[in-house]
Amino acid sequence: MTDPATLSATDAARRIRDGRLSVTALTEALLARIAAREPEVRAFIHLDPALALRQAAAVDRALKAGRAGPLAGLAFGVKDVLDTADQPSQYGSAVWAGHRPRADAACVALARRAGAVILGKTVTTEFATRHPGATANPHNPAHTPGGSSSGSAAGAGAGFFHAGFGTQTAGSIIRPAAYCGAVGFKPSFGTLHRAGMKVMAESLDTIGVIAGSVGDAALAMAGLTGGDYGAPESRPGQAPRLGLCWGPTADQAAAETREAIERVAAAAARSGARVEAVELPAAVIAGLEAHALVMNGESAEALAWEMDHAAAQLSEGLRERMEWGLGQGRAALAAGRTAFAAARAAFADVIAGYDAILTPSAPGEAPEGLGWTGDPAFNSLWTLLHVPCVTVPVGTGPKGLPLGAQIVTGFGQDREALAWAEWVRAAST
């Protein structure tokens, strides 16, 4: 008999809908898997199995009453910068230890409305910025899972849940998903409402999902939003026009990443894709140069209360970066936001000639150790452009850790991003 914990979200949803699998049985199987590996992976900052099973039983009752939502019975992990009414929300900081919100974040409320079971809160770095938590990479616990969506990426990579909520300000969905061998989807900016999120950078923060497959990510997004995210496993009628873009941080690509992306590009070409090298215009590069200033300046505004009343409980690195951002002044922050807008306009002209951009998901394999979550060198640009991004697994590096390829499309082309990401993944396997 198939262990329910090994089922994809798509398969589990089908069995639940057909009455062949109860939500309680599925939740019990996932909790058993978590119990076996969580001491090593440490994906959760809060996990209450009894609460999860009560939620599962309630969804089973709703199914019997004919009130099942599109995500009925599927398990979610929630990054701990997103509020939950029934579990602590501590934002990765001692400042908020034990905090119990009254309401769910909007995305969590939508997941519950769709019938999802919220398994627990997943580890985040401090305010989704710096100072990593204890989570380890499920493929090798001596290596980082990436961040800041550390627990959601590690949990998805370990098969603890069907989807984990992540947030991205620089590279916090795509990079950890790639490190953990999962699929990360950062949708177009603003797709999932940020109410109930501990927002840090108003111009950048984006909520997305990390899942086991592109199809599972599409299912999760469709269930959360009611939007059309397609059926990525259905192969499009024609091959894509791909722009191969290393971007302004090309020199940071490790040998294993350069080999992997070149191999993926060659495989795509053999499958019929038109692959062309893309150089980004100066306006786009100028946007990237403004990223750190805008991110840290806006974060300093977001944490004004914490800086004034609990500065001693913030990490030294976070305080230093926010003080630097604040010190640049309002005029520099406004200029940075203007540079972002110009970059978005310039990129719209670039992407108009292609179906998607192919680019690295991260500089290389997950770094060794848990004290650093890796560099967002291949993510910050796409985040400030507000465009949808998907990372898919495309093999392993010299240490046997996962590598990812990133697919980027134009703003609002989220369905296309998922479809072409799956096309590229299938072509490269």
Image (cartoon, rainbow, N blue to C red):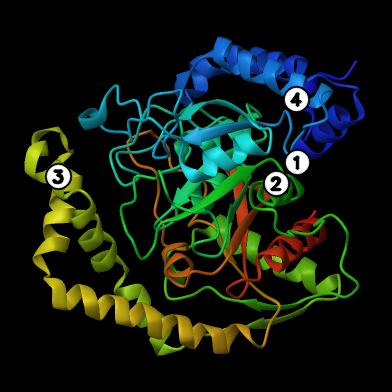
Q: Which amino acid type is shown beneath numbered disc 3?
A: Trp
* Residue 237 sits in quarter: bottom right
* Residue 380 spot, x, y in % from top left: 41, 64
Disc 4/disc 3 C-alpha distance (Å): 42 Å
Q: Nearer the viewer, mark 4 or mark 2?
A: 4
Q: Answer above or below: position of 143 versus 353.
A: above
- Label 2 secondary element: helix
Q: Answer above or below: position of 356 versus 25.
A: below
- Furthest-top residue in this view: 50
Disc 2/disc 3 C-alpha distance (Å): 36 Å
Indicate which disc, 4 or 3, sits on the residue closer to the N terminus: 4
Disc 4/disc 2 C-alpha distance (Å): 16 Å
Q: Is residue 230 left or right of residue 225?
A: right
Indicate which disc, 4 or 2, sits on the residue closer to the N terminus: 4
- Label 1 secondary element: loop
Disc 2/disc 1 C-alpha distance (Å): 5 Å
Identify residue for label 1.
Answer: 70
Indicate which disc, 2 or 3, sits on the residue closer to the N terminus: 2
142 vs 65, nearest the viewer: 65
Asked if the residue under mark 1 is in contact with the one under mark 2, i.e. CB atoms within 8 Å, the reply is yes
* Residue 31 spot, x, y in % from top left: 63, 15
Identify residue for label 4.
Answer: 62
Q: Which amino acid type is shown beneath numbered disc 1?
A: Pro
Q: Residue at x 39, y 86 (%)?
A: 342
- Label 3 secondary element: helix
Residue 305: give its label: 3
Q: Which amino acid type is shown beneath numbered disc 2?
A: Gly
> Total number of numbered labels?
4
263 vs 174, nearest the viewer: 174
412 vs 344, nearest the viewer: 412
* Residue 197 spot, x, y in % from top left: 39, 45
